[in-house]
Amino acid sequence: MARFRTWVGIALAGALSVSLAACSSTGGKRAEDARKAAAAQGRAAVNTPRWTFAMITHSGDGDTFWDIVQSGAEQAAVKDNINFLYSHDDEAQQQAQLVDAAVDKKVDGIIVTLAKPDAMKAAVARAEKAGIPVITVNSGSEESKAFGALTHIGQDETIAGEAVGDELNQRGKKKALCVLHEQGNVGHEQRCDGVAKTFRGTLRKIYVNGTNMPDVQSAIEAKLQADRSIDAVVTLGAPYADTAVKARTDAGSKAEVDTFDLNAKVAASLENGTLGFAVDQQPYLQGYQAVDLLWLYKYNGDVLGGGKPVLTGPQIITKDQASALAEYTERGTR
């Protein structure tokens, strides 16, 4: 496999019981089928008790990124003889209620995202008061330790943004648009602020309603039509990259579209030159390691990270590396 440019060393090591996250129309069904097959054929590699772990994320419906996180978590759960429960809500108060439901269910461990940490603090504290170990994943690295979590697994969003700024500089870009699709998400703000920190050109933020793709497209298109000097559009999630490309086309703009996160469509668009580059934070690894580290804690009292986040990225992926990832993105693990 082609060697990736790695910006950070990778440190490796009800609603809950009824439903899984909704799958996207562009890959979630395939990922779901793969997960079901793995669950049906997989065998535990250990004989430890069948503990129950709950993962509660801030995902909205139809986001392929979270399909990949969930896939990794479920694969580790099969190996570790874990009863795995997944739930999600993109509204912070509802996400907190799902954490409360997991506590009431007396699960043996909780994995949670902290995209909107203030709204999650009390729920996480309640879990810890009940003696339930908590690992944070994906978002909330700065709050994780203060909230009492065992560790945090994900990428440092500021460092990831800085990597994007550096890449834009290398590509000679002068004016970039950073598209934030979820207001109040601290990780998204950190990404854009990180870009601004290292980018030598001008960066503008635009806030869009990420649950309404036609509105996202029209908002980006309007910006590109109003300012022809914009030569780069940075989206903060893989599903929004294709929408930005459509906006660019309709606006008659020549701006390069780049994105955070990777999925099969992004990999194909990188390979054919529709996208410039992508930032991969390895969501499969986030889900897998979260379950695995909770199991290690329950079984052996192990805690990874030494008080620091366990980093899963970022990696800058360009056209040269995209073809090497095709097999993995097609099977829903990258």
Image (spheres, rainbow, N blue to C red):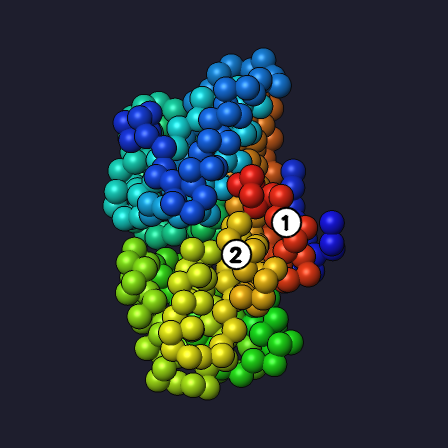
CB within 8 Å, label 1 to label 2: no
In the image, residue 276 sits, relative to residue 82, either above or below, namely below
Q: Could you say which is closer to the camera, residue 237 or residue 225? A: 225
Is 253 placed left or right of 312 in the picture? left
**For the residue marked with disc 1, what is the amino acid?**
Leu
Residue at the location (56% across, 43% down)?
A: 330
Q: According to the image, label 1 marks what residue? A: 325
Marker count (numbered): 2
Residue at the location (57% across, 55% down)?
A: 267
Report which quarter residue 295 is drawn in. top right
Residue at the location (31% across, 26% down)?
A: 18
Q: CA distance from mark 1 to mark 2?
A: 11 Å
Report which quarter residue 166 is drawn in. bottom right
Among numbered discs 1 and 2, the one appearing first in the sequence:
2
Q: According to the image, label 2 marks what residue? A: 266
x and y percentages locating residue 249 in the rendered image:
42, 73
**SS class, disc 1:** helix
In the image, residue 204 sits, relative to residue 182, either above or below, namely below
Disc sitting over residue 220 in the figure: none
x and y percentages locating residue 292 in the rendered image:
56, 31
In the image, residue 127 sits, relative to residue 50, either above or below, namely below
Report if residue 120 is visible in the image.
no
Circle 1 packing at 10 Å, graded few (<14), some (14-19), many (20+), is some
**SS class, disc 2:** helix
Report if residue 331 is visible in the image.
yes
Residue at the location (52% across, 56% down)?
A: 266
Is 33 placed left or right of 296 in the picture? left
Circle 2 packing at 10 Å, graded few (<14), some (14-19), many (20+), is many
x and y percentages locating residue 199 in the rendered image:
55, 77
x and y percentages locating residue 310 in the rendered image:
59, 46
**For the residue marked with disc 2, what is the amino acid?**
Val
Is 173 placed left or right of 28 in the picture? right
